[in-house]
Image (tube, grey):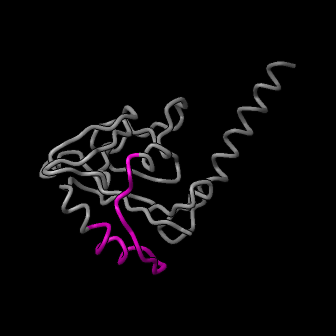
Amino acid sequence: ALLVICFLLVGATTALAEERFKDNGDGTVTDQQMGLMWAKGDNQGDITWKQAVKWVTYTLPLTVQTSYENWRLPTVEELQTLYIKDSPDKVSEPDCGMRVRIVKTIELSCGWVWSAENKDISASVFSFKDGYHFPDLMMHDKAHRALAVRNVK
């Protein structure tokens, strides 16, 4: 009986996570708990921080099917809400060779994502491989990606 209860609890938790992130069918995913809309995927290649800002502002809006405004780079805190640390079935291995742990409705082509947080010549990068963030020089691009987000409300 205890095993059945544990199974039901795990199933309910997984179902809640699935309901939280709604694929809008237009290249975007809405996090209904946080009130954020994410691009369904990243920019698909190595990118510097300044290029990432331009990509989320100018390029991404042309690729989603519905016209939304106010795309931006996410904060480290917002990126952390997408990281899945405990579930082995949430790990993907994109072509870059880095194991990535992220909610399954969002696809990354590599595991390091630029955040909006910056100072002088560096900016924070979130690792979807390990769940931590670190400062890096804005001019670095190897394995760095841009993921766009906007506030729904």
Instruction: Kindly identify the residue that appears in the image at 33 percent across and 42 percent down.
Output: 126
Magenta stretch: residue 66 in it?
yes
Q: Quadrant of the C terminus?
A: bottom right
**Quarter location, residue 116:** bottom left
Horizontal and vertical percent position of residue 28: 49, 66
Identify the residue at horizontal 70%, vertical 45% (top origin): 15
Q: Residue furthest top?
A: 2
10 or 127, which lies in front?
A: 127
Which residue corresponds to the image point at 47% horizontal and 41% vertical from the top-left?
83
Figure label count: 0
Q: In the rendered structure, does residue 49 fall within the stretch colored magenta?
A: no
Task: Specify the farthest residue to the bottom.
Answer: 67
Q: Residue at x 69, y 46 (%)?
A: 16
Judge left or right: residue 55 versus residue 42.
left
Start and end of the magenta stretch? 55-76
Residue 85: horizontal and vertical position, in percent?
Answer: 49, 32
Q: Quadrant of the N terminus?
A: top right
